[in-house]
């Protein structure tokens, strides 16, 4: 009889432990990236002239995207959604770093990055990384960003990677879902330990 009761208690504890493990990571919107380590890189911040190393952002949640300053459509939308998220994160805003990597090395100068950032009200916890094609192309490749430059526009993926404070890629969002999913996912990641 005691063995039967202990068996039931043991099964209940196993079920409870499995349920608690599932509670460790919230369900996030977008494409689940399986918590793999985010590819590291070091690039120049067009706003300050300093360098930014992605792995040095551990302890912060990172919203990583790929933009260009003369973009007529998706890039301004993404920047606007980043600013709205910053404004609505309230006390969690300092837990999130927003990073844009240029996909237009020929036109995205530090001055252009500064003007773009100012036009969208982005300054707090915001970096616009620039460089030459030789520096940027490996980063694009490691994040699966296809870049098709032309004389006027640059075709590219509208990816936004959310990276948790342990440096793991958690979810991939796209511009059409940023308005509904970005803020909720950032808040959920901020609640994680």
Image (tube, rainbow, N blue to C red):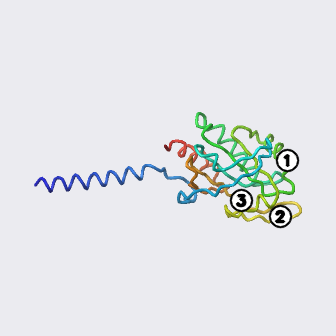
Task: Indicate left or right for 107 with 190 as reference.
Answer: right
Which label is found at residue 23? none
Contact check, label 1 and label 2, Cβ < 8 Å: no
Question: Closer to the camera, 123 or 58?
Answer: 58
**Residue linked to disc 1:** 112
Question: In the image, what residue occupies the spot 57% across and 49% down?
Answer: 164
Discs 2/3, front = 3
Q: Which of the two discs, 3 and 1, labels the residue nearer the N terminus?
A: 1
Residue 159, image quadrant: bottom right
Q: CA distance from mark 3 to mark 1?
A: 20 Å
Q: Which residue is mark 3?
A: 139
Pointers 2 and 3 in contact (C-beta within 8 Å): no
Disc sitting over residue 149 in the figure? 2
Disc 2 is placed on an element classified as: strand
Q: Image quarter for residue 120?
A: top right
Q: Nearer the viewer, mark 3 or mark 1?
A: 3
* Front in this rendered view, residue 181 or 123: 123
């Amino acid at each position: 009889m005691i063995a039967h009761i202990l068996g039931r208690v043991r099964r209940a504890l196993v079920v409870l432990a499995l349920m608690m493990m599932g509670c460790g990571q919230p369900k996030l919107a977008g494409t689940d990236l399986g918590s793999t380590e985010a590819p590291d890189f070091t690039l120049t911040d067009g706003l300050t002239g300093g360098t930014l190393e992605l792995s040095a952002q551990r302890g912060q949640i990172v919203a990583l995207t790929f933009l260009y300053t003369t973009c007529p459509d998706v890039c301004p939308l993404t920047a606007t959604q980043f600013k709205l998220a910053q404004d609505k994160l309230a006390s969690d805003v300092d837990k999130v770093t927003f990073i844009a990597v240029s996909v237009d090395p020929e036109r995205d100068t530090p001055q252009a990055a500064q003007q773009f950032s100012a036009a969208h009200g982005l300054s707090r916890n915001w970096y616009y990384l620039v460089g030459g094609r030789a520096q940027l192309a490996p980063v694009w490749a490691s994040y699966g960003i296809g870049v098709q430059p032309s004389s006027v526009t640059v075709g590219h993926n509208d990816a936004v990677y959310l990276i948790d404070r342990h440096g793991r890629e958690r979810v991939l969002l796209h511009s059409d879902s940023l308005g509904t999913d970005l803020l909720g996912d950032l808040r959920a990641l901020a609640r994680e330990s």
